[in-house]
Amino acid sequence: MIWKGKNGPLLIAEIGGNHEGSFQYAKKLLNLSCLNNIDVVKYQIYQGNTLVNKNLSRTRYNHFKNFELTKKQHLYLADLCRERGFKYLSSVWNKEDLRWIEKKMEFFKIGSGDLTAYDQIYETCKYKKPILLSTGLSTLKEIRETLNFIKNTNKFYKNKKNIAILQCTSSYPTKNEEVNLNTLKTLKKIGYEIGYSHHGKTPYPLELAYTLGCNILEFHFTDTRKYKKFRDHKISLTPQMVNNLIKKIKLINTYLGSNKKEPTKEEINSGNVKSFRRGLYLKRDVKKNSIIKKEDLVSLRPAQSLSAKYFFKLINKKAKRNLSKLEIINFKDFK
């Protein structure tokens, strides 16, 4: 399954723009992320002039221009990632760039900012690869509209396994009260695989999201939070934090255990199934052919006798033999 990872959830380490336009730093972060037991290394592909109207937002335009990597550099990073044995992913914010990078990806990521960019989504759908849709900034109505647009654009997406939805809050850092993990319950009702994209200071919501049924966990990744000016470093997980997260996930997997409700091996082997439960016993000696009354019975531990759940079934039964007080009894002793 594409939405599953080595440790249970699919773990996506987003380097994003944390390289700050440095190819060497981008490689360093990739190599660091691959030392952790994650599943996917993610970048972002953009050019300032195809993403931002510089007449309206010169600051944002300059930011993206300064953080650009070249086509050659992105292809190198994609190949390096795959050589390391990890999946490569990138949010591609320009339709033209999809043509030369799509073969490097098993699935696509539509970022929160592009949830309503139907022209970009239309081009993405042409390649018939699963889509991971992030939902920051959006209403439930907008999410449903975009999902319908995707399905109507290409019948490949009528199979719900080919789309997954990420709960996301697009603020950096996300305030604790705006993480809104309860939204996962709402998104799950739509019928797609769900995940969580994290922008908070502490990784704790990632652990909670997993226990709430998220099989995809996306988080920003950096080497250190110290001495960094770029915003995203402050909400990124460091290698140690990723290691701790994976340890917690493994522990959660242990706690989650089986979905089959039955006595555990330890409950059986310890004898607790019988010693903790009650069996039926007689309060007094009963002679053969006597009618059993409610007052004749008592339920006591251990359940070595007939189970206490048959208390009312024994009433008005007739004893087949003489029965002693507190002896072990069975249905064969009555008629």
Image: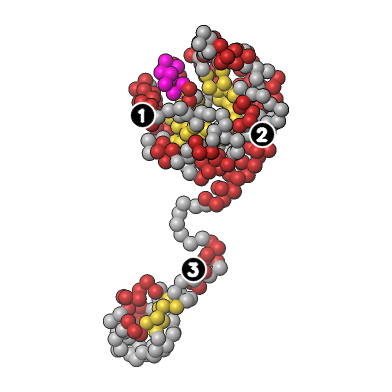
Label located before the other in sequence (1 or 2): 1
In magenta, the rendered stretch is: 114-121
Kindly report the distance in space between the C-alpha atoms of the residues bearing marks 2 and 3.
46 Å
Mark pair 1, 3: CA separation: 50 Å
Residue 91 drawn at (x, y percent): 53, 22
Residue type at mark 3? Val
Between tags 1 and 2, which lies in front?
1
Report the side of 295 relative to 251 (left or right).
left
Residue 99 lies, in percent from the top left, at 51, 14
Mark 2 / mark 3, whichever is N-terminal: 2
Tell me the residue that label 2 is attached to.
238
Q: Which residue is mark 1?
A: 141
Pick the residue in front: 61 or 210: 61
Label 3 sits on a secondary structure element that is: helix
* Horizontal and vertical percent position of residue 74: 61, 17
Q: Residues within 10 Å of mark 2 (few under 14, many from 20)?
A: some
Magenta segment includes 119? yes
Q: Is residue 82 above or below residue 4?
A: above
Q: Which residue is mark 3?
A: 273
What secondary structure is the stretch in magenta mostly built from?
helix
**At x 42% / y 21%, what residue is drawn?**
116
Q: Earlier in the sequence, mark 1 or mark 3?
A: 1
Tell which of 63 and 285 is nearer to you: 63
Q: Give amino acid for label 1.
A: Lys
Residue type at tag 2: Thr
Q: Decide: few, some or many residues near mark 1? Use Cα within 10 Å; few <14, some 14-19, many ≥20.
A: few
Residue drawn at x 46%, y 21% as measured from the top left: 114
Whether residue 152 can be seen here: yes
The CA span between labels 1 and 2 is: 35 Å
